[in-house]
Amino acid sequence: MTTPSMEDYIEQIYNLIEEKGYARVSDIAEALNVHPSSVTKMVQKLDRDEYLNYERYRGLVLTAKGKKIGKRLVYRHELLEQFLEIIGVDQDNIYEDVEGIEHHLSWNAIDRIGDLVQYFEEEPSRIEELRNVQQQNESE
């Protein structure tokens, strides 16, 4: 079972590996705005829990288990960003809002949000109708 902190690390490591082909402790620390010593401790824990393989001074590689959860965490993050965009949340707030809610939703809730995003994207007029409702509510 992962904690929100573990999820943040796995998600970031997954993203770094996807973008750069590797993830170093210094890259993870910079991306998460934490000290490298904190990253080392978490990476060692993730290694013990078999989410990644870590060799000091040699780097780290996600295991199949780590890749699977990393991919799912990235999907969750992107889906929540899409959802907040669709419902009209200001772009400046989306990243922080996603960071604030992503660990507090069940995977069932995430799946239902996915259904809703699909519903809106299948018929763009639905998004237009939502915008009309929002404008009407704001003008009242």
Image (cartoon, rainbow, N blue to C red):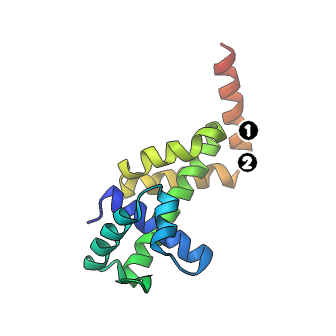
Check contact, mark 1 vs mark 2: CB within 8 A: yes
Considering depth in this image, is 94 or 41 the residue closer to the camera? Answer: 41
Residue 32 in the image: x percent, y percent?
Answer: 47, 58
Which label was assigned to residue 60? none
Vertical relation: 100 (above or below) 77? above
Residue 1 in the image: x percent, y percent?
Answer: 26, 66
Describe the element under mark 1 as helix, strand or loop: helix
Q: Amino acid at mark 1?
A: Glu
Which label was assigned to residue 128? 1
Considering depth in this image, is 55 or 77 the residue closer to the camera? Answer: 55
Q: Which residue is mark 2?
A: 124
Q: Quadrant of residue 21?
A: bottom right
Quarter of the figure that contains the C terminus = top right
Residue 65 in the image: x percent, y percent?
Answer: 37, 79
121 left or right of 105 in image: right
Q: Residues within 10 Å of mark 1 (few under 14, many from 20)?
A: few
**How far apart, in angstroms, are the residues tagged by discs 1 and 2?**
7 Å
Residue 125 in the image: x percent, y percent?
Answer: 74, 43
Q: Residue at x 35, y 62 (%)?
A: 38
Say how many tags the image has: 2
